[in-house]
Amino acid sequence: MLNRAAGLAASLALSRVLQDLVFSIRPTDPLTFVAIATLLLVVAVVASYVPARRAMRVDPISVLRE
């Protein structure tokens, strides 16, 4: 929980720096924060699901024998 709060505080501080690079978005736009957090969540789920799915197809006995 503390990591999330620190990350949110850092992102708010760094958004001021990035304001000059991104046009038509306010530095503290809540929709942008939610969209980016959702995008990162989806990427993390997909990145975890693909190897887990592959690992579920392996026969546990054959792996233990090796």
Image: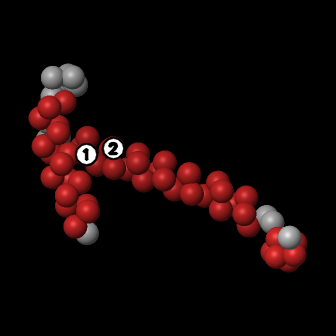
Q: Secondary structure at mark 1?
A: helix
What residue sits 49% from the left and 48% below the top?
43
Q: Is residue 45 left or right of residue 40?
A: right
Q: Secondary structure at mark 2?
A: helix
What residue sits 20% from the left and 53% below the top?
8
Residue 61 on image: x %, y %: 85, 77
What residue sits 42% from the left and 53% below the top?
41
Badge 1 crowding class, 10 Å Cα cut-off, few under 14, some 14 to 19, many 20 or more, is some
Farthest-out residue, front: 66
Q: Is residue 62 left or right of residue 24?
A: right
Badge 2 crowding class, 10 Å Cα cut-off, few under 14, some 14 to 19, many 20 or more, is few
Q: Which residue is mark 1?
A: 33
What residue sits 32% from the left and 44% below the top?
35
Residue 20 on image: x %, y %: 15, 23
Amino acid type at image mark 1: Phe
Q: Are marks 2 and 1 in contact (CB under 8 Å)?
A: yes
Q: Which residue is mark 2?
A: 36
Q: Is residue 11 visible?
A: yes
Q: Which mark is residue 23?
A: none
Q: Is residue 13 left or right of residue 60?
A: left
Q: Is residue 30 visible?
A: no
How many angstroms separate mark 2 from mark 1 (CA)?
5 Å
Residue 21 on image: x %, y %: 21, 23
Amino acid type at image mark 2: Ile
Looking at the image, residue 39 lies above or below residue 6: above
Residue 48 on image: x %, y %: 57, 57
Looking at the image, residue 37 lies above or below residue 4: above
